[in-house]
Image (cartoon, grey):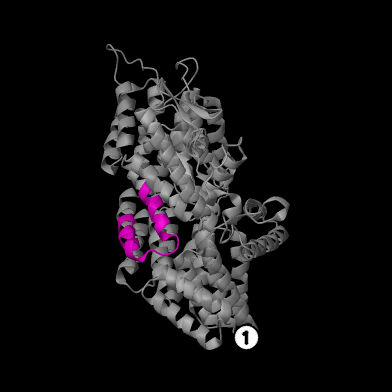
Amino acid sequence: MNDVAGTGLVEQGRDAASIGDWPRAFGLLVRADQHTRLTIEELGLLGEVAYAAGHLDVTIEAWERAHAEAVRAGDSLAAASAATRVALHLLMDTALMAPIRGWVKRAERLLEGSETSPAHAWLALIKSYDHLMRGDMHGAQEWALGAIAAGSICNPAAAALGRVAEAHAVILRGEVCKGLGLVDEAGVATLSGELDAVSTGMLYCELVCMLQGLGQHDLAEEWTEAMERWSRTSAIGSAHGRCRVHRAEILRLRGATAEAEQEILAACAELRPYLRREFGWPLSELGRIRLQLGNLPGAEKAFLAAREAGWDPEPGLARVRLAQGDVALAAASVRDALDHPQAVPSKELPPSTDLRRAPLLAARVEIEVAEGDLAAARDAADELAAVAASFQSRAMIAGAAMADGQVRLATGDLTGARQAFGTAVQLWGVVGAPHEVALARVRLAQAQPKAGTDVPTLVTRPWPVRTAKVDAPMTPNVLRRQGDYWALSFQDHTAALRDLKGLHYLSRLLTHPGRELHVLDLVAGETTQAATPRGSLDPDLKSSGWGDSGVLLDTQAKDAYRRRLAEIDEDIDDARLLSDSGRVAQAEAERDFLIRELSRAVGLSGRSRRAGSASERARVGVTRAIRYAMSRIRQQDPSFGEHLDRAVRTGTYCVYLPDSRIPAIWTT
């Protein structure tokens, strides 16, 4: 293809982007890039379209190429602008701070002596978030004001996001009313239509993330609804998936936990291509939802997966341990989380301030009361009350009242306990959190005097606890292969079915409740089990016939990861020269994470793992096989079939999500 044809594709891609047809625009620009050398401006267009179409790695690589082209052309301003966009996308969707700092330094060197430009505004915004995530509110506010000043001259999007960053810093410094006023001012830009789609999506995300983290649930819900309305027709990048996470948080708070679980699972699927370290964020929310549902195995697996992604799963994991009856481990976990907070840079979490400690303190009160250390429980309750008073969040004040009541109940102060629990009931009611209202009412009932005396009743935990001493042993359900047949036993009803490959898939799902399994893993596991009757596998699921559209990380993506690793090594050397141990630890954690990501994408002998059309063929075949097997089970045992219909979800990732009333214990 000649340059004229390539230029035509670029113009067609530009036209498609102008009407929001991101997939078509991306395809056209990729074709143009394969056959002609794109200009700096065209590479920037490719970067923006790739992000909107869901290709983060292509976005960053396009801006890196634009930077290199501008450097070769001697265009310092264009090179600086491209460098800031690389840093911005790394910030918004990976939270890998070491590479971000490297690109910021490049941009600063290139901008020396130049007049105010959009690059100055974006650079100030990035530095504001860097300070914010490190807990330096003064520095965050100062750089936010710089972004607003520069952006007001030449870039409204940077100015609008700068106002969000300023509001965040002001609120975290304790000036809540002033900060919330700035939130309203920042939000005007989303309604004015003056921003492009990418910037609008970022602005919505930042507003909602900030408000959720501050416990301002009413405002967060309003902005989430506005974000959802916008995303139905204009969603770009990771915005829709982030919408789902925030919607799931609201649904959980409102008591609609089943709907919340569906929403968060969909969010995980949508965000998987975008988030790196921050993928622990939706996983942690999944854990909280399952914990509220009483699905302890599923909650535990979600929290452990979040930790594996480099996220801090506490206090969720400690609450799971408490619900499992391991009070000592729960206490050790929550104490360690408070004494040694993990440095997890994230826009989705408050920085390492008192606000980050609030949920940990609430969990510690409950756990220390169960442990019998009432002095530690009182200290945690008092600290939580002080944090709640500072941030003026109804939800946080309600949580502090609940904590105070728990300590008073345990120490025999029934009058004080009733007052505290009554306050919690009232405030949680105003917030609109029925689950929390119910827990507070249970505690309030426990604080009522018995037979005219003020002796407190035994404090019971609000979570289900399974112990061998209390609960009768649960009879496991059975789905076990026996030769050419499978034995089925569900709630004392037994049956038998001739071997079907869908039963192999179901067997793996049932023995891993709550765990998402990729269809390629299910197919691989099925083909490595004992031989099935000849001809039982679908031809299109045999490994020799899969075909594919590429590796999990293609050469380009793996090269990008390796560049990130080199940038991290440079940041580690720089931090060691400055004796900044915290920065060294953070960078080393980021390096370990990227190495794990690369290892996950590389098979034996260094061969790249494949994906693409193989996944689609496997998805179709596995779904068909599972659904057929479930229909046969339903014929033999209608109650078992009905349970599977409710609990088994299929797709590229399949999962078994049992109802909390059905023991998730299977013999296979």
Region in magenta: 224-248
x then y, percent, for residue 477? 46, 25
x then y, percent, for residue 272? 50, 54
| Residue sitting at the far front | 534
Q: Can residue 312 be seen in this view?
A: no
Residue at the spot 55% in from the left edge and 34% down from the top edge: 333
Quadrant in which the N terminus appears: bottom right
Q: Is residue 543 or residue 26 the one in the foreground?
A: 543
The quarter holding residue 71 reads bottom right
Mark 1 residue type: Ala
Q: Mark 1 points at which residue?
A: 73
In the figure, 94 relative to 631: above or below?
Answer: below
Residue at the spot 54% in from the left edge and 72% down from the top edge: 84
x then y, percent, for residue 403? 40, 32
Q: Does the magenta stretch include residue 132?
A: no
Magenta: predominant secondary structure element? helix
